[in-house]
């Protein structure tokens, strides 16, 4: 079995490195570096460069102007984005567009995907539910009224909601023997959609979305079975890729600092206690990487296995959440007081790591989910 990346996947990662080369979190001032500040929108200039490099259309078919690549290619690009804390809705936008392509109708695809691939239309996803601890698909209900749909409910902590043109909202359809989840493509200015500002630990602007009888046409709802489960799995796996890139950058920063910082006439990197802690974090990163590619491969290939794809996604999320937390905590410890300085970039990486750790659910939630999957699909 060949575990190497394809030429197209490597080319996507190389293109991403070129685009993100100009992004320097340790040199460019950002509102997220200032305690209490809120960032104003995402980086539109970077977004344009990603569009010019065809990195917003990686998962789209050639018919929609895309490269026709898979989840592995997207995660390679997201890994590079995580290393520089790129302030763009790359994950949410790409995953939403891919879900429209995979599960939406031809009219929806023709109307949205080419524009999304060019970055002219910005998509995001409401995936946190009402509180961040309950299933997102149960936080909003959808019911028919003639040919239209009416949506009611609340979704919390929606990223990039103030900047997106469309928010993909999972919604629960009730009814005897007909309970299911649909994906609603909610325009930013939809009547009955109310925004309440929230702020993430990273200083980014989030929104609580309150849907009060939001009316959508039949062409604004995706009814295909399995659409939300697939989209949620891709979002979780992409979050793991962001966490991996962030963790790798933080460990590199830690190595550079401990290699220069001296105590008793020697770099502290030569001290056994420091070296052992750094080695443990390297092991965390390699475990994060292995489980990430397993999950991305299962999503990309729909390969059969003893567990559903959700099992691989759960394992990747457990390692990403726990691993990235340990990496930044060790980095703060080994940097000493210097790491707590808000003028030093490690502070910002720590804030983003905490956000990624909890995004789409902490490790404990996925351990419980994995336990349920193992109980339902006993091995051996």
Image (cartoon, rainbow, N blue to C red):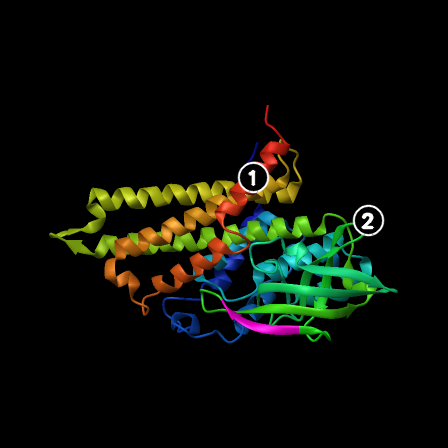
Left or right side of 18 for 175: right
Residue 147 sits in quarter: bottom right
SS category of the residue bearing label 1: helix
According to the image, label 2 marks what residue? 176
Residue 370 disc label: 1
Report, in whole angstroms, how far the alpha carbon at label 1 lies from the one at label 2.
Answer: 29 Å
Q: Which residues are magenta?
A: 194-199
Q: Position of residue 41 (x, y in %)?
A: 54, 74
Residue 142 sits in quarter: bottom right
Q: Position of residue 363 (x, y in %)?
A: 49, 47
Q: Residue at x 68, y 62 (%)?
A: 168
Q: How many marks?
A: 2
Residue 346 sits in quarter: bottom left
| Residue 51 can be seen, yes or no | yes
In the displayed image of the protein, which residue is found farthest to the left?
264
Q: Residue at x 54, y 49 (%)?
A: 10
Q: Does residue 217 show up magenta in the picture?
A: no
Query: In what quadrant of the picture does the C terminus appear?
Result: top right
Q: Position of residue 194 (x, y in %)?
A: 65, 74
Predominant SS along the magenta part:
strand
Does the CB distance between marks 1 and 2 fall below 8 Å?
A: no
Q: Residues within 10 Å of mark 2 (few under 14, many from 20)?
A: few
In the displayed image of the protein, which residue is found farthest to the right?
146
Of mark 1 and mark 2, the one earlier in the sequence is 2
Q: Residue at x 49, y 55 (%)?
A: 358
Q: Residue at x 64, y 44 (%)?
A: 300
Residue 162 disc label: none
Left or right side of 182 for 44: left
Nearer to me, 17 or 104: 104
Camera-near label (1 vs 2) is 2
């Amino acid at each position: 079995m060949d575990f190497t990346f394809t030429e197209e996947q490597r080319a996507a990662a190389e293109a991403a490195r070129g685009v993100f080369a100009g992004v320097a979190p340790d040199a460019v001032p950002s509102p997220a570096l200032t305690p209490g500040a809120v960032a104003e929108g995402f980086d539109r200039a970077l977004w344009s460069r990603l569009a010019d490099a065809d990195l917003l259309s990686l998962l789209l078919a050639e018919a929609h102007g895309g490269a026709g690549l898979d989840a592995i290619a997207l995660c390679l690009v997201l890994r590079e984005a995580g290393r520089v804390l790129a302030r763009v809705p790359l994950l949410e936008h790409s995953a939403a567009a891919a879900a429209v392509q995979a599960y939406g109708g031809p009219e929806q695809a023709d109307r949205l995907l080419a524009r999304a691939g060019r970055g002219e239309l910005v998509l995001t996803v409401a995936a946190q539910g009402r509180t961040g601890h309950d299933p997102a698909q149960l936080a909003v209900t959808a019911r028919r009224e003639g040919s239209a749909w009416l949506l009611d409910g609340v979704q919390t902590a929606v990223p990039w909601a103030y900047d997106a043109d469309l928010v993909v909202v999972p919604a629960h359809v009730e009814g005897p023997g007909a309970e299911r989840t649909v994906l609603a493509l909610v325009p930013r200015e939809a009547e009955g959609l109310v925004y309440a500002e929230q702020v993430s630990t990273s200083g980014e602007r989030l929104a609580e979305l309150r849907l009060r009888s939001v009316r959508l046409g039949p062409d604004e709802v995706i009814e295909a079975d399995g659409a939300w489960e697939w989209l949620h799995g891709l979002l979780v796996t992409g979050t793991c890729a962001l966490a991996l890139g962030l963790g790798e950058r933080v460990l590199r920063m830690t190595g550079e600092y401990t290699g220069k910082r001296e105590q008793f006439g020697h770099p502290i990197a030569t001290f056994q206690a420091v070296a052992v802690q750094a080695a443990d974090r390297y092991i965390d990163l390699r475990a994060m990487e292995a489980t990430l590619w397993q999950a991305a491969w299962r999503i990309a290939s729909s390969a059969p296995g003893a567990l559903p794809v959700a099992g691989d996604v759960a394992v990747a999320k457990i390692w990403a959440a726990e691993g990235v937390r340990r990496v930044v905590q060790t980095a703060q410890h080994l940097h000493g007081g210097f790491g707590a300085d808000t003028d030093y970039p490690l502070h910002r990486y720590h804030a983003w790591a905490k956000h990624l750790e909890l995004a789409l659910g902490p490790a404990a939630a996925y351990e419980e989910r994995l336990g349920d999957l193992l109980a339902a699909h006993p091995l051996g």
